[in-house]
Amino acid sequence: MNRRILLAAASALSLIAAPALALAQSLAIIHAHILSQGPAGEIASGTVLIKDGKITGLGANLAVPNGMRVIDAAGQIVTPGLILPSSSLGVSEVDQVEETRDDGAGDRMGAAFDVQYGVNADSALIPLARLGGVTRAVITPVLGRGGEGAHKDDGSDDFSGSAQDGKASLFAGQIAAASLASGSRSPVFKARIGMALDLGEAGADYAGGSRGAAFVLLKSALDDARHYAKTRKGFDTGASRPYPYSREDMEALVPVAEGRVPLLVRVHKASDILQVLKLAQEQKLKLILEGAEEGWRVADAIAKAGVPVLVDAQADLPGSFETLGSSLENAGRLNAAGVLIAIMGSRDYTNLRQGRFNAGTVVSYGLPYSAALASITINPAKIWGLADKIGSLEPGKDADLVIWSGDPLEVTSYATAVIIQGQDQPMTSRSLELAKRYRPGADTDYPPAYR
Amino acid sequence: MLTTLRLTALLAGLAMAGLLGACATASPTASSKSAAKALPLGSDSGGDATTEPAPFASTYKPLPSQLTAIVGAHILTATGQDIETGTLVMDEGKIVAVGKDVPVPMGAKVINAKGLWLTPGIIDSHSHLGVYASPGVQAHSDGNEATDPNTANVWAEHSVWPQDPGFNRARAGGVTTLQILPGSANLFGGRSVTLKNVPSVTTQGMKFPDAPYGLKMACGENPKRVYGHKGRAPSTRMGNVAGYRSAWIAAASYKRKWEDYRAKIANGEEADRPERDLTNDTLSGVLAGEILVQNHCYRADEMATMIDISKEFGFKISMFHHSSEAYKIADLLAREGICYATWADWAGFKLESYDGIAENAAIGQRKGACVVIHSDDPIMAQHLNQEAAIAMAAGNRLGLAITRAEAISWITANPAKAMGIGDKTGSLGVGKNADFVLWSGDPFSVYSTANQVFIDGAKVYDRKDPHFQAQSDFELGQPGEGVHP
């Protein structure tokens, strides 16, 4: 009910000031235990000042200007909003309902596939993720249409034909960053922030079955892209050399090949990681690794190359022959070696809440608490080039923050308030509405549908 | 070993007693003139779910243990007690005392557990370890005999690879007992097997002695998808239901044939022995109440349909698995005495799981249902304590005031009950198997780890002592060797 009233109120307001979603609001959060992830560090009891969607002040002894709305956090922990470093949020609603999947290009397109156009602001998963403290998500396409880590409740076999069918390219496509702000008509705030690529077994599979072929094809695609960039006119007049990829693919690859846009490489075993590092150095690519289950075995090389890594910290099983060295200590060892890490969950629905729990879990496996919290806030922002606006609580940055019931990494804690660009977010979701409809004591003489 | 002489007498004796499977009373001196023609037991025991000696019998032997007192731990007994500082005493693999003021017996080894938490061993009632072993390559894909919608004839234990590294990881997460199920491609997936989570070269060496078998059944999307794609029945949910009912009709007929045959033999009449059929052996075992139905079923409406089928054919469903919508019919499930196993909040990966909510377990707990948190996943199996914590916290946020003493039973006592081993394990009561976990702290915290794990009083895992960190043959000499504390 409350939600409906709020929506009604919101629409009434929008009649008056239609385009100004971020009204000139000001807000002070006081008595907060601030874990800023920025230069202000930890403030045991402090104030965050917010105006026009930005943080304007942060500190222990800040005066609250007159007229500001005040939230008394009364000792609760306040952190920056969490950032999913690699997800399918908004582009995959129900994993096994094909029509709801926009997270891969299938067999029609490769590098040119641009995930930004399919992001659904009305996804029921966005409010759910937000309730878990997530305020931004990086949306990374998957090869074919097979969501990695997608739960198979029939015990992992896929009977209906491979979801991995139809790979048009080594490249999965272009990456976007989205805000989870309620009511946003354009959740993507930065598109084409990276290019996703699968190597290892998945890449080899595309290339005919072996890694040697995949690496050669990758080098050749990058060479072609550079050649294309120099001879665009020739391409139009048919004077250029032939490329195996389309014009659109080549356009998408140019900034990657020129090292301006990062290449996200999904790679798992130590030997593959070393090959990718070598290739990136030779070709002067900006590299981000995802997966890297055996990353800890070559952590020094990754650190030396200055390459960041997105890890699913819970992955500790030899799920394939390229992850024989998986360990719960991966995140901790990478961090100790000086690698910038961001922690993610698996790609499916659980991704929405699992990131922070994964970060918490590996605190007992060698990752310091501060690094764990950084790995779901400021680190993903830095890795994706978004740290000028988000990822920490600093004056001048977007006011994305979460007030927690307790320790944000703890499984029994939850967000009590979520603020994105200064706006209070509705603390409800489809799941919560179901829970309220069926909670004990909710019964009436009429069926639940009337509740 | 039974001789052929004894076998015939045994069958006659069973029929007279009206008991299936209780053969220990057969007299070794019994004699019969027809002995020469008798077949080996396996060819001859149709309709009897628990032939004796059972085929593939457990060879499990507890590892060495000694009289031990665990002193000073925060104990959750899974019988409703939350003892802030208590003592547990075990001897010969059994719990002999547990409580706040329990004296340490003379000669007992003392483990100082001050600051640690002690719970029953975690029981994962929905696991595919061994049947979908790591690495997950095609060669290890042994969980779904997806060649017929009714494969009640297959037994999960015949697919289990005991070297699956997942068993060791699960043990490091506190898991002491597992139900290994066939997959859910079929209406009837086959028999489950209950295993003690001890390292063993053979599956028989892990089998939980005297645990009843389960029958895996599956509702909904999977069977209709798998067989619909093959252009055969079932391709719809109504096709699923027709498939269940037809199978139960056949099973009842089979059961009756064997009962008639045994009655005739018992009366000294001539009778042709019916042919044994493995599918109907299992299904008639369910009808006889000896095999427990473990039913993968997500939606509320489908669970209600399955309950009606069970009534139509006179069997009981022990537990629904996954049960994303159980909270919608928690009253019904409580009334029927059917447990339901679910995840904390894993949902939405397929349409029949779309309404899964984190409050599912807590709502059932408050409505008096038997609630279980399961994994169905080799990673989640290592963190079932966290799953229970997430589900507990979601319930508490809804105002349901779920306690740790209650929530611990979701991953211990309740799955034990649903698997038919609640009299042996799953709770810390006198006489129960000494299956328990010493946690580094509150098991409902993300930071807590299983420090020591005991099965039948024997230490099977110690986070701080490499001598008690079992490693699969598969992982020896591999990159992962030695990186799993």
Image: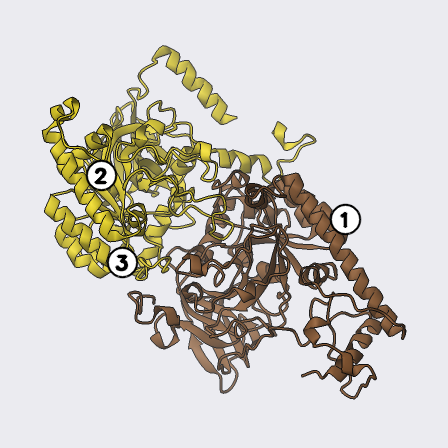
Chain colours: A yellow, B brown
Q: Report if the CB atoms under discs 1 and 3 are less than 8 Å apart.
A: no
Same chain shared by disc 1 and disc 3: no
Image-quadrant location for residue A7: top left
Distance from the alpha carbon under mark 2 to that under mark 1: 59 Å
Residue B166 point in image, percent of width and height: 42, 63
Residue B162 point in image, percent of width and height: 47, 69
Q: Nearer the viewer, mark 3 or mark 2?
A: 3
Residue occupying the point 59% across, 58% down: B414
Rendered-image quadrant of the C terminus of chain A: top right
Which disc is residue A384 wearing? 2
Judging by the rendered image, the residue that carries numbered circle 3 is A294
Residue occupying the point 46% across, 49% down: B390
Which disc is residue B312 wearing? 1
Amino acid type shown at disc 2: Trp
Q: Is mark 3 on a helix, strand or loop?
A: loop
Residue B26 makes an appearance in the image: no
Residue A255 point in image, percent of width and height: 16, 34
Q: Earlier in the sequence, mark 3 or mark 2?
A: 3
Q: How crowded is mark 2: few (under 14 residues within 10 Å), some or many (20 or more)?
A: some
For the residue pair B167 and A451, the one nearer the viewer reads as B167
Residue occupying the point 49% across, 81% down: B65
Which disc is residue A89 wearing? none
Distance from the alpha carbon under mark 3 to that under mark 2: 22 Å
Amino acid type shown at disc 1: Glu
- Tell me the chain of label 1: B
Above or below for B219 versus A325:
above
Amino acid type shown at disc 3: Glu
Q: Residues within 10 Å of mark 1 (few under 14, many from 20)?
A: few
